Structure formats: structure tokens, C-alpha cells
């Protein structure tokens, strides 16, 4: 039987209820004395099952190997945050062979390792990577959408006489062009 790390699997010692069962090692099992325990090993483990028949005084031994595949090392990155001069951000996922990005909003394609994101608000994207063994892991990356500046001019509507001048003061941005 094959599982991914942090998963579990039912191992089978199904020889009927008239027998006594003893699994070894008993660690990483829901019970070492039942017919079909759930195994949750962190590494590949070979379990030995001893089936005892108390009536005929006969013991049988079986081996069950549980192979544990590691999880993919999925990583996510982004090229930049979004603002008025950078309307998109390139997302990149590595460490797996297949990818699924969520949420869908603002993505050009959610099933490739490098979608282009153009969300209208700050969005946390979560990518699930799947490896060749079917094992999955996730990573996330937030794309921040920086709002446009709110520019104000003071006084807002100055009244001046012909030939006179008024001082206008702008606020809300870093650079101004008049």
C-alpha cells in the first residue's frame, strides 16, 4: 500500500473474527490488536501481522508494507505588487508537476505554474501542487493592490481678480505635474 506523508491507510489482516491479531510495530496504528487497523506512519514501514488460532494452536505471520511518499516542496512567489503603473503581477509556483491556483478572480489561467494576476483588490492566492505520486502540498502568495492616490488642491475653487495670483497647494501624492 502506498500513501502520502501525513495520510493514513487501512491495513488488512482480514482472516475472520475467531482469531487473535497482533501487529508489530504497534506504533502509528489505531490499534495493534484488531483485524484491520488504520496505519499512519511518517516513513515507509513494514508491519508484521501474527494471526493466532487459539483452537488449533496455530500461528500465521504476514507482512504488510506501507510506502510513504514525501509531500512536494511547493513554493510560491510573485513579481511585484499592483499599482497604476504595474497593472499585473506574475505568480510562480515550483516544486510539483501540476498546479491549481485559487481564488480564480484576476488570474489568466489557474492550472499553470506561472499565471498572470490582475486582481482589483489585494488578494491572497493559494496554490496546490501535485507531484507524480499524487501527493499534494500548498503555498500562498499575496498580491497587494495599491490604491490610486486621492489628490486634493487647496483652495479647491479659488476666486481671484484678473491679473492677480493665488497659491494652490496640492496634497495626497508624491509627485505633481501642473
Image (cartoon, helix red, strand yellow):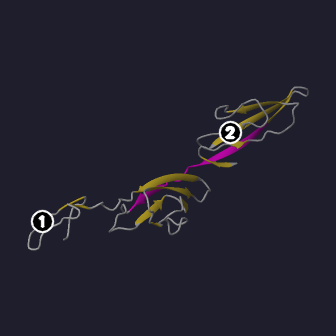
Q: Which residue is mark 1?
A: 166
Q: Residue furthest bottom?
A: 162
Which numbered dot is residue 39?
A: 2
Q: Residue furthest right?
A: 55
Where does the image place residue 59, in percent across and percent down from the top left? Answer: 82, 31
Q: Residue furthest front?
A: 161
Element type at mark 2:
strand
Q: Nearer the observer, disc 2 or disc 1?
A: 1
Q: Measure the alpha-carbon separation of dots 2 and 1.
A: 81 Å
Q: Would residue 64 be counted in the magenta stretch? A: yes
Q: Residue furthest left?
A: 163
Quick one: quadrant of the C terminus? Answer: bottom left
- Segment colored magenta: 61-78
Where does the image place residue 37, in percent across and percent down from the top left? Answer: 74, 36
> Which quarter of the figure has residue 25?
top right
Where does the image place residue 94, in percent across and percent down from the top left? Answer: 47, 60
Q: Residue shown at 36%/62% (left/top)?
A: 80
Q: Nearer the viewer, residue 157 or 94?
A: 157
Q: Would residue 118 be counted in the magenta stretch? A: no
Q: How many marks?
A: 2
Which numbered dot is residue 23?
A: none
- The tag earlier along the polypeptide, 2 or 1, is 2
Element type at mark 1:
loop
- Tag 2 near tag 1, CB within 8 Å: no
Q: Quick check: 40 above or below 140?
A: above
Amino acid at each position: 500500500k502506498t500513501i502520502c506523508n501525513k495520510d493514513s491507510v487501512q491495513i488488512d489482516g482480514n482472516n475472520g473474527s475467531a482469531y487473535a491479531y497482533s501487529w508489530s510495530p504497534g506504533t502509528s496504528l489505531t490499534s495493534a490488536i484488531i483485524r484491520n487497523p488504520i496505519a499512519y506512519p511518517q516513513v515507509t514501514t513494514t508491519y508484521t501481522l501474527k494471526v493466532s488460532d487459539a483452537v488449533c494452536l496455530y500461528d500465521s505471520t504476514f507482512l504488510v508494507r506501507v510506502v510513504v511518499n514525501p509531500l512536494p516542496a511547493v513554493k510560491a512567489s510573485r513579481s511585484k505588487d499592483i499599482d497604476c503603473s504595474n497593472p499585473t503581477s506574475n505568480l510562480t509556483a515550483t516544486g510539483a508537476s501540476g498546479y491549481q491556483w485559487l481564488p480564480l478572480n484576476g488570474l489568466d489561467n489557474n492550472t499553470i505554474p506561472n499565471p498572470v494576476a490582475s486582481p482589483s483588490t489585494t488578494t491572497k492566492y493559494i496554490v496546490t501542487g501535485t507531484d507524480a505520486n499524487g501527493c499534494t502540498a500548498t503555498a500562498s502568495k499575496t498580491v497587494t493592490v495599491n490604491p490610486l492616490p486621492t489628490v486634493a488642491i487647496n483652495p479647491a475653487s479659488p476666486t481671484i481678480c484678473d491679473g492677480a495670483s493665488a497659491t494652490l497647494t496640492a496634497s495626497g501624492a508624491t509627485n505633481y505635474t501642473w
